[in-house]
Amino acid sequence: MDIQVGIDDIAVHMPRLYLSMQDFADLRSASYAKLSKGLGLEAMAVPDVHEDPATMAANAVARLIDRNELDPRTIGRLYLGTESALDGAKPTATYILDMLTQRYQDRYGAACFSRCDAVDLTFACIGAVDALHNTLDWVARADDEDRIGIVAFSDNAKYERHSSGEYTQGAGAGAMIVRKDPRLLVIGPVFGVSTRAVHDFFKPRRKMPVRDMLEHVLHLATKAGAELPDGLTDRMMQALREGEDSLFEGETITVHKDTPLFDGAFSNQCYRQAVKLAFGHFREESLRTGRMNTSDPVLTEQWSRIVCHLPYAFQGKRMFPDIFHHDRKHRADWAPVAEQVGPAPARDDYADEEAYQADREAFRRSVSKTAEYRAFVDDKIERGQRASSLVGNQYTGSLFLALMSTLESDLSQGNDLAGARIGLCGYGSGAKAKVFEGVVQPGWQAVTAQFDLFGRLAERTPISAEQYETLHRGAQQTSVVSPSKEFVLREVKGGDQEGQRVYAWVA
């Protein structure tokens, strides 16, 4: 008999601020109709001054601990999925443990988290799925039936202003209890995987010659009206070479940026391809291990709901026409769809890759417009989009936000999902996809009733376009909304401890 391991509960923490997509569209002279009706975007979550990936995750874990009355000394690990690391060596998970220790040490002792294993896992947006996969195995192999792990996820999905990714921005964090015999969702042991090395989205270590930086600053000084002598750059460089300077230690300086380099169209293509291949791998492994209903091997029909990584709300439904076709093309019920869309383009019929991809995209659009596909989306995918529309991209958390959105929406509609199978499709640029399956447990309604996801989203504070710009540039000095009952970033130190981050709980 299989060991039943999975997600016992989920909690999230969202920034209290948001920018409406109408205000964003007005700010950037963009089409609100395209952003809203075309991509499903209504608002983006924006972190306040006192918030960062560590505080957001710590707040989510604390919510989970308090709601479930967990003794921190029983938590054996805290694995964090993030692509918004705060340090090149020190894991963000340790900052989270520091905050949690501050909060719970009076009750459980200063060493209450000292035996908790902690680490960050990074693979773009799929890092939290990797952390979950790893922790499921860790819980399953334990002799202790009460072994508990927490998987956290936290990111600030920030893009350059005026870039083509800016409208997908969002932020937030969450945490999941992973244990045997979970109340919410049992995760099966089969994971379909697809990995290949691509550069669709990445955050490189960028280097800039010191000379270029100095020349840029002097150019700005000249534009501001300063009169500068000739040869000043050369003399400054010579002074740097002859002296000691803590900032410029060499001829180049490494620049860290939270914002990525990316190719949106290529990333969408990589996403579709990776999930399709992972889906095929999952199907093969399910058949091989006897975990699939072979009398009806159409997985997307066996799954009552499908939950996807959503860099924007409608990405899931835009990505799935390929799998919808692949899963049904040999069945009789594909015939009426085929009459509407025609045959799918075959790669061998094209000498030119660009022409093939263009025709594939046209085929996908045709499939997506059929009544059959729209009914499929409404039944299996749409509920997961609802929270994403109000938050934006969460990077590692977007899949699990979509899961919460699905479960809470079904609960509010009075649907009983007990025993239902949910397909989960994660993706991380770079690129990797994982497809796995969860079975909803009889106690799911009581757990889901405590989410209050949409209620808390409705309580957030809207900000103006001007406030958004100030926060994005890092020019805001004080919190827009005073923190209350949450962890906050108090200080980033300078001097000998330059970069050390100091956190505290605000009652």
Image: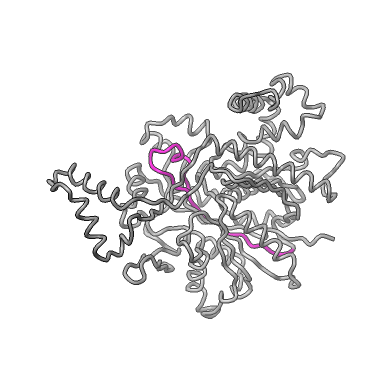
Q: Position of residue 412 (x, y in %)?
A: 63, 46
In the image, the segment drawn in magenta is 157-180
Tell me, yes or no, whether the highlighted magenta stretch contains residue 400: no
Which of the image's four quarters has the N terminus?
bottom right
Viewed as shown, does residue 16 lie left or right of 180?
left
Figure check: 267 above or below 351:
below
Whether residue 21 appears in this view of the structure is: yes
Q: Residue at x 42, y 58 (%)?
A: 51
Q: Residue at x 12, y 46 (%)?
A: 227
Whether residue 459 appears in this view of the structure is: no
Q: Residue at x 35, y 57 (%)?
A: 479
Q: Nearer the viewer, residue 80 or 484?
A: 80
Figure check: 147 above or below 465:
below
Which of the image's four quarters has the C terminus?
bottom left
Quarter occupied by residue 329: top right
Q: Position of residue 411 (x, y in %)?
A: 66, 48
Q: Position of residue 475 (x, y in %)?
A: 31, 52
Figure check: 130 above or below 245:
above
Q: Position of residue 166 (x, y in %)?
A: 43, 40
Tell me, yes or no, whether the highlighted magenta stretch contains residue 175: yes
Q: How many numbered discs, if any?
A: 0
